[in-house]
């Protein structure tokens, strides 16, 4: 497995595929078993940093495009990686999740305040779709 320098990227792409499509019809126990298997592979890798970099980039795409099947599975994977790698390695990934939760809350608050403003009924403002994401600088791969 470690003879090929692309193995960490391939495992990260496999994870990405599972988080986009593979976990769709699985139970929580089956998801946990698959994640355990992925983490066991990760433990055997010599290129852990390359896996984390690839995984982080693919995770960012899933979060921003909202293509992840299960956010609980994503958090479970991050917790498993934190056990293996430590807090410092996984800190950026956790911050990415926190950014998405903050962005969602800010957008809900914004839309609520916009709806409460007097004189907005029937105006052009209601017909405009607006979505913004608040991202922490330096924690996102791109």
Image (cartoon, rainbow, N blue to C red):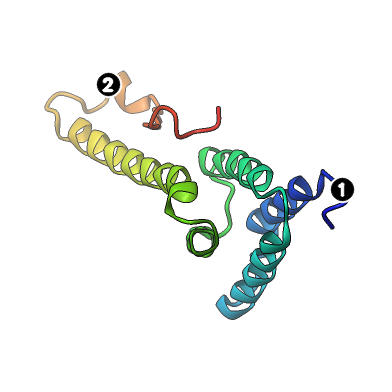
Q: Nearer the viewer, residue 62 or 33?
A: 33
To which residue does mark 1 refer?
4
Q: Quadrant of the C terminus?
A: top right
- Residue sitting at x 75%, y 45%: 9
Q: Is residue 119 left or right of residue 138?
A: left
Q: Nearer the viewer, residue 81 or 30?
A: 81
> What label sits on residue 113 in the rendered view?
none
Q: Quadrant of the N terminus?
A: bottom right
Q: Which corner quadrant of the image does residue 14 belong to?
A: bottom right
Residue 99 in picture, x, y percent from top left: 37, 40
- Element under label 2? loop
123 w.r.t. 74: above or below: above
Residue 10 in picture, x, y percent from top left: 78, 49
Residue 122 in picture, x, y percent from top left: 27, 25
Q: Nearer the viewer, residue 57 or 101?
A: 57
- Residue sitting at x 59%, y 80%: 29
111 w.r.t. 10: above or below: above
Please name which of the two marks, 2 or 1, marks the residue nearer to the observer.
1
Q: CA distance from mark 2 to mark 1?
A: 59 Å
N-term-proximal mark, 2 vs 1:
1
- Badge 2, how many Cα within 10 Å: few under 14, some, many 20+? few
Residue 94 in picture, x, y percent from top left: 42, 49
- Element under label 1? loop
To which residue does mark 2 refer?
123
- Badge 1, how many Cα within 10 Å: few under 14, some, many 20+? few
Q: Work out which residue is located at the far left of the displayed protein and give it.
A: 118
Q: Is residue 36 left or right of residue 4?
A: left
């Amino acid at each position: 497995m470690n003879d090929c320098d692309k193995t960490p990227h391939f495992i990260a792409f496999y994870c990405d595929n599972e988080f986009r499509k593979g976990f769709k019809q699985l139970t929580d126990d089956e998801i946990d078993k698959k994640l355990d298997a992925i983490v066991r592979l990760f433990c055997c890798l010599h290129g852990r940093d390359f896996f984390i970099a690839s995984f982080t980039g693919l995770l960012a795409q899933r979060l921003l495009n909202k293509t992840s099947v299960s956010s609980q599975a994503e958090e479970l994977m991050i917790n498993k990686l934190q056990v293996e790698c430590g807090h410092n390695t996984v800190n950026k990934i956790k911050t990415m999740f926190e950014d998405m939760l903050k962005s969602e809350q800010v957008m809900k608050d914004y839309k609520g305040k916009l709806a409460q403003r007097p004189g907005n009924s029937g105006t052009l403002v209601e017909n405009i779709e607006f979505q913004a994401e608040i991202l922490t600088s330096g924690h996102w791969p791109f």
